[in-house]
Image (spheres, helix red, strand yellow):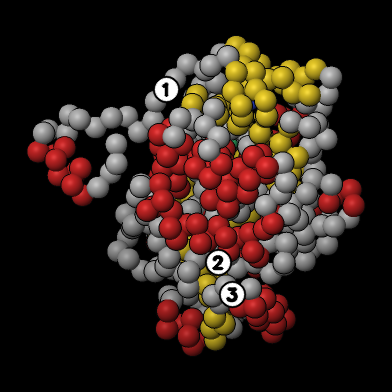
Amino acid sequence: MRYSALSILLNGLKGNKDWTPAWRSPAPKKHYDVIIVGGGGHGLSTAYYLAKEHGITNVAVLEKGYLGAGNIGRNTTIIRSNYLLPGNNPFYELSMKLWEGLEQDFNFNAMVSQRGVLNLFHSDGQRDAYTNRGNAMRLHGVDAELLDREQVRAKLPFLDFDNGRFPILGGLFQPRGGTVRHDAVAWGYARGADSRGVDIIQHCEVTGIRRENGKVLGVETTQGFIGCNKLALAAAGNSSTVARMADLTLPIDSHVLQAFVSEGLKPFVDCVVTFGVGHFYVSQSDKGGLVFGGDIDGYNSYAQRGNLACVEHVIEAGVSMIPALSRVRVLRSWGGIMDMSMDGSPIIDRTHIDNLYLNAGWCYGGFKATPASGFCYAHLIAKNEPHKVAAAYRLDRFERGYMIDEKGVGAQANLH
Ligand SMILES: Cc1cc2nc3c(=O)[nH]c(=O)nc-3n(C[C@H](O)[C@H](O)[C@H](O)COP(=O)(O)OP(=O)(O)OC[C@H]3O[C@@H](n4cnc5c(N)ncnc54)[C@H](O)[C@@H]3O)c2cc1C
């Protein structure tokens, strides 16, 4: 069923009895051309683009929980394409362009809101680094504006500009960045994939990968064995555990990242603001809640909840940058599992097993990549060659030393 103003009106007149489910709940078939492990944003968008761009519709997405239970429904909804390096920049800009047409494309309201993303800077050195980044973005055709202190003050007067430790000198602004309703992205892609024939199978955990003569035959699941020609992993925070089923060890650590939402307030933060040196960022949801977060909890975990020390750190950083936050009540918080790669950049690649494909290493920034990740992963699966904007995301770069060190922190993962 196509959603439109007319369909809402007609269904409303008939008592809203004719709506059909947004996607089916089929029993798994015995065999598929492609099985995707993980019904998060990346798995669902991959299925959608496999069907839409390549006509491959004999596809199953296997999800151990329900759609939206993973990071796609847990992130803080920020999208941006303010990247520095040539390995990253065209990929994230493709994602931004896909976001810009996404709602019309999959006929679903994902509340794409290009309200702008502002990264604050606090020293001359940091301003130079942001100028460098802004110039790299503009050279790649991406929008970027360097704001001085007074321009930031005019936009966000409530920030503590004379903060003793981190006085605000300005910020790098990407006007086309913003927020998107995260779970609607999962639902929109699921609905779009399902309508093209993809089977989305929830509550179906992959427990093993069956192989013969170095080739994947299919997966063992909690709903039995399911065969496939190609197996595509998109399990985000659980990538290492799923890859281990095929005896693959990934250069990935799993960490918890927490997020917080405050009580509803009148509109006062009209763009996304990041206070990177303090590990704090905030935006305001359409319902009025402040949505904010900080850095990862500093230990490996597969729990979808974090610790109090990190909560304290995030709130302290927030109050130091926005003193008025001290009077705001936090309503809820949660955690998600991050698949932290060793250089902070993702992997979209074939593995040494011919029909096994890998999509992982999204760290804490994979939501904004959802459209381009699915688009490029579908291209790889369909054609067995990388899409040109994702060509740098090779698994063997860690072995060859070709890191995509976007943050410039060097080879030490613990400095992320
Ligand atoms: C608190 C928080 C804030 C974040 N903020 C942002 C942000 O503002 N902007 C941004 O760009 N990114 C952000 N991220 C990161 C982003 O959410 C992730 O990088 C991205 O969502 C990961 O891809 P996914 O959507 O496919 O993951 P998921 O939704 O986690 O999908 C993976 C799925 O695989 C399933 N799975 C795992 N193992 C199995 C198995 N054995 N069998 C079957 N299914 C399995 C899981 O249940 C899960 O549903 C944030 C993350 C968190 C937790």
Residues packed near mark 2 inside 10 Å, few (<14), some (14 to 19) or many (20 plus): many
- Distance between the alpha carbons at the discs numbered 1 and 3: 42 Å
* Residue occupying the point 83% across, 35% down: 352
- Looking at the image, is 164 positioned above or below residue 33? below
Residue at 80% in and 17% down: 212
- Which residue has dot 3 on it? 141
User: Which disc is residue 274 wearing?
Assistant: 2
Dot 3: few (<14), some (14–19), or many (≥20) neighbours within 10 Å? few
Give the mark nearer the N terminus: 2 vs 3: 3
Amino acid carrying mark 3 in the image = Gly
Residue 381 image point, x, y percent: 66, 39
> Is 394 positioned to the left or the right of 332 in the image?
right
**Pointer 1: what residue?**
25
The mark closer to the camera, 2 or 3, is 3
Q: Secondary structure at mark 3?
A: loop
Q: Nearer the viewer, residue 289 or 77?
A: 77
- Please state the horizontal and vertical placement of residue 318, each as a whole percent of the image: 52, 63
Above/below status of 85 relative to 332: below
Q: Amino acid at mark 1?
A: Ser
Q: Residue at x 73, y 32 (%)?
A: 356
Label whose residue precedes the other's in the sequence (1 or 3): 1
Q: Is residue 227 left or right of residue 57?
A: right
Name which residue lies at 35% across and 47% down: 107
Kind of residue at badge 2: Thr
Q: Earlier in the sequence, mark 1 or mark 2?
A: 1
Q: Is residue 134 visible?
A: no
